[in-house]
Amino acid sequence: MEKKILLINQRMSIIDALKRMDEVGQKLLIVIDDNGLFVGLISIGDIQRAIIANRDLSIELSNILRKDILTARKGDDIDTIKAIMLKHRLVYMPVLSDLNEITDVIFWEDIVKEDVSSFSCGQLDLPVVIMAGGFGTRLKPLTNILPKPLLPYGEKTILETIIARFQQYGCNTFHLSVNYKAELIQYYFDSLNNKTYDVSLFSEDKPLGTAGSLGLLRDRIKSPFFVSNCDILVDQDYAAVYDYHKEQQNELTMVASLKHYSIPYGTLETGENGELLSLQEKPTLTFMINCGFYILEPHLLAEIPEGTFFHITDLIEAIKARKGKVGVFPISEKSWIDIGEWSLYSKILMK
């Protein structure tokens, strides 16, 4: 990878950095000044902490740079650099001159010859509930034959791809909420010979909404647990989401993607008697979008009414109504893939 695509000026905004990360497929950027000299590093974690702290997305990166960063100096022994990168699992390390010129960038794959994403990311060992009972209407006619969770995604099914990502974090106990074509899903998992995880299916007798079926697990889950829709992929450090959940003492944490929408017209703000107050040409608006990925505390299962149609948004409203705490963990736009949308899934099939 060319180092120049990793560079971003310190005067650029938080939202500019988030978009750049999506463009180059990296969650770490090198921050430089107007002379091209090294100023610091900005990670997705830095941006997420700023968003959680309600910092304005338009502020310059110089306002949120950390001091505690790791870099190498020109002339440093490569074995020493490698040891530091291995210890801290760094995707890359800039090499600087005495004048803070960037002389090189050493990448993980150049020294280890392995993909960093293939390594275990910690041992959360939390149960995972995957909501796999939908009819997959957005993906018809494919779902007339196969249930959505069993549709192919690369070399695996969508469901196995989701499970594999959780396994990287030591999560090996999965509960699948099923309904539509449940017997095919059960048969598929029964036919797998080398599963390295435990999976159990539970079924609702009638549609109970996105949270109603969770109540069926009230006697089976006694720890915090993840909930994921079966048609999404989240490219995020799941341990960081859980750390945020614990630190904030949330009862429920939802992951949200920052989606950007460009308006192709000039927008106007007016005041009394139609007086023009401001004009903005073709603005881009940013919204937080619910990804369908959550962490819940186990006591919430007892708050889900039995046998009643109940969405997870109903549960969130009930928590808020009694002054409970619901947190939102932000991720970038391209860190969330909604596979259940035909326009996106068809592109995946064409790859």
Image (tube, rainbow, N blue to C red):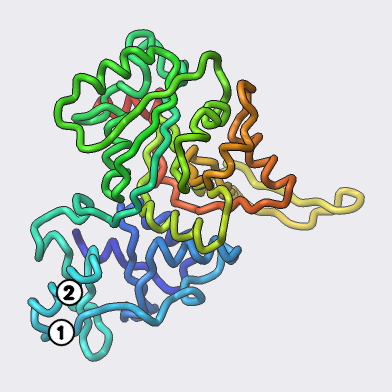
Q: Are marks 1 and 2 in contact (CB under 8 Å)?
A: yes
In the rendered image, residue 69, in percent from the top left (x then y), is placed at 33, 78
In the rendered image, residue 226, in percent from the top left (x then y), is placed at 44, 43
Vertical comparison of 42 with 314: above or below: below
The crowding category of the residue bearing disc 1, from other C-alpha atoms within 10 Å (few below 14, some 14 to 19, many at least 20), is: some
Residue found farthest to the bottom: 98
In the rendered image, residue 263, in percent from the top left (x then y), is placed at 59, 42
Would residue 344 appear left or right of 70 to someone viewing this image?
Answer: right
Distance Cα–Cα, label 1 vs label 2: 8 Å
Would residue 2 appear left or right of 147 to someone viewing this image?
Answer: left
Task: Please report the residue visible at 38 percent of the width from the left and 12 percent of the height from the top.
Answer: 181
The amino acid marked with disc number 2 is Asp
Vertical comparison of 313 with 44: above or below: above
Would residue 178 appear left or right of 52 to someone viewing this image?
Answer: left
The amino acid marked with disc number 1 is Lys
Viewer-side residue, 249 vs 254: 249
Q: Which corner quadrant of the image does residue 199 belong to?
A: top left
Vertical comparison of 86 with 259: above or below: below
Task: Please report the residue visible at 20 percent of the width from the left and 56 percent of the height from the top.
Answer: 116
- Residue at numbered disc 2: 104
- Residue at numbered disc 1: 74
